[in-house]
Image (cartoon, helix red, strand yellow):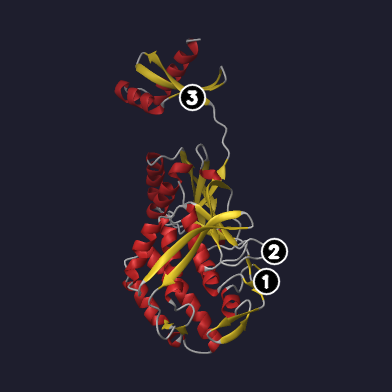
């Protein structure tokens, strides 16, 4: 199976705590979340979760209660990165959390005209925001490392009080983080926080998800009541619909620098690894260079393993995959007797009608080697024996 998919719909916006709340509503273990975040060596804190409802939608509301706030109210980027690096969070979660803070740091440096090394976070440097970012990265691990997609973010309007004074909504950092991404200038108040924007910028794809088989839906409930929309972040977890049982994929790679000996071996490896079929076709590549098109047919369950095999065993830098529809005949084997010995015949039927019959090549070859006769001779006799059966 390929990676699951997580699709975020910021109906009422997005913030770090709303993301975590939605993850908890999806079924992420609160104890696993607290255990991982406890390795950050931050002052005393606790997660308070309650069931909440906005406009008839029920989900989880999360609040990070900090018992020992930082006296200065801010932290330098270097200290935050050190806390993340020294934690016992999974390696990928540490890397993702650090990337989110780096993105925030770059934006703050640009806005305030300082080097990124000089950036000190105020709201984002607070304990609750560090827990939000690291918690989001850990939640993705606990959800099975899904591909994350997100609908366009609503930015809100008005103004908000910050450590730098009264600022317009959306905040300058939010706009900078979302440059180049689709957004919606709508709503009242701050609907997308800088932390929420950074999570989407770094971790998500700003596009609709692929067709899904929906497995679970979670709602992260925001604090405010809004007249024009429910203050919720909806998160839908599912599996790409092409990965359901029976789906079939074609894998392809263009090769213009791969030895024919490697290609022959790779076709055998693909078949041994579960490919339904595998092939190599001559092709004329860019700049008129002769090359090959390597292809394989595989069920959804074996797709990832075959992709990895092609990447390891060939010289390609990438593999294309796409779902295909396949109509197949029902198949069964019968055994026929020839003067050389028994041969299995693969029979393809449509309903009760036999449309195809073919001797199994390995049976024919083995008998031909023993009898020291041409393979085609054993093949023809086996096929004749089958059709004479009536």
Residue that carries the numbered disc 3 in the rendered image: 331
* Figure check: 114 above or below 16: below
Quadrant housing residue 80? bottom left
Labelled disc at residue 231: none
Residue that carries the numbered disc 2 in the rendered image: 228
Relative to residue 351, is residue 256 drawn left or right? Answer: left
Q: Nearer the viewer, residue 94 or 375?
A: 94
Which element type, helix, strand or loop, lies under badge 3?
Answer: strand
Which element type, helix, strand or loop, lies under badge 2?
Answer: loop
Which residue sits furthest bottom? 113
Mark toward the start of the polypeptide (2 vs 1)? 1
Relative to residue 10, is residue 74 drawn left or right? Answer: left
Q: Residues within 10 Å of mark 3 (few under 14, many from 20)?
A: few
Mark toward the start of the polypeptide (2 vs 3)? 2
Quadrant housing residue 140? bottom left
Q: Residues within 10 Å of mark 2 (few under 14, many from 20)?
A: few
What is the C-alpha distance between the residues marked 3 and 1? 63 Å
Residue 227 % position (x, y): 69, 64
Q: Are marks 2 and 1 in contact (CB under 8 Å)?
A: yes
Q: Residue at x 34, y 62 (%)?
A: 35
What is the C-alpha distance between the residues marked 2 and 3? 59 Å
Residue 38 % position (x, y): 34, 67
Residue that carries the numbered disc 1 in the rendered image: 188
Inspect this view and state whether residue 349 appears.
yes
**Of circles 2 and 3, which is in front?**
2
**Of circles 3 and 1, which is in front?**
1
Q: Nearer the viewer, residue 211 or 8?
A: 8
Q: Residue at x 45, y 75 (%)?
A: 101
Q: Nearer the viewer, residue 158 or 147?
A: 158
């Amino acid at each position: 199976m390929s990676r699951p998919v997580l699709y975020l719909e910021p109906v009422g916006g997005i913030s770090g705590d709303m993301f975590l709340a939605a993850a908890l509503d999806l079924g992420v273990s609160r104890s696993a979340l607290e255990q991982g975040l406890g390795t950050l060596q931050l002052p005393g804190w606790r997660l308070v979760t309650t069931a909440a409802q906005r406009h008839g939608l029920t989900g989880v509301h999360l609040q990070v209660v900090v018992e020992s706030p930082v006296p200065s109210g801010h932290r330098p980027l270097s200290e935050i990165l050190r806390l993340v690096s020294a934690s016992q969070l999974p390696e990928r979660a540490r890397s993702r959390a650090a990337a989110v803070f780096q993105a925030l740091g770059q934006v703050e440096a640009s806005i305030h005209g300082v080097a990124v090394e000089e950036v000190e976070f105020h709201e984002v440097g607070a304990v609750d925001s560090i827990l939000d970012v690291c918690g989001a990265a850990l939640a993705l691990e606990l959800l099975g490392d899904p591909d994350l997609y997100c609908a366009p973010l609503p930015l809100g309007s008005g103004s908000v009080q910050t450590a730098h004074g009264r600022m317009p909504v959306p905040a300058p950092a939010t706009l900078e983080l979302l440059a180049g991404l689709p957004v919606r200038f709508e709503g009242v108040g701050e609907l997308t926080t800088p932390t929420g924007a950074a999570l989407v910028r770094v971790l998500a794809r700003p596009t609709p998800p692929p067709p899904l088989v929906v497995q679970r839906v979670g709602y992260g409930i925001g604090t405010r009541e809004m007249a024009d929309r429910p203050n919720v972040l909806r998160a839908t977890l599912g599996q790409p619909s092409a990965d359901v049982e029976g789906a079939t994929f074609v894998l392809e790679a263009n090769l213009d620098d791969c030895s024919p000996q490697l290609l022959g071996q790779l076709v055998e490896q693909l078949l041994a690894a579960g490919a339904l079929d595998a092939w190599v076709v001559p092709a004329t590549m860019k700049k008129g260079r002769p090359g090959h098109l390597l292809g394989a047919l595989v069920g959804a369950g074996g797709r990832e393993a075959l992709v990895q095999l092609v990447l390891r065993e060939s010289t390609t830098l990438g593999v294309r995959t796409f779902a295909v529809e396949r109509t197949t005949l029902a198949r069964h084997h019968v055994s026929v007797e020839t003067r050389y010995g028994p041969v299995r015949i693969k029979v393809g039927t449509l309903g009760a009608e036999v449309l195809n019959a073919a001797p199994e090549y390995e049976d024919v070859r083995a008998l031909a080697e023993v009898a020291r006769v041409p393979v085609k001779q054993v093949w023809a006799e086996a096929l004749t024996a089958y059709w004479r059966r009536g």
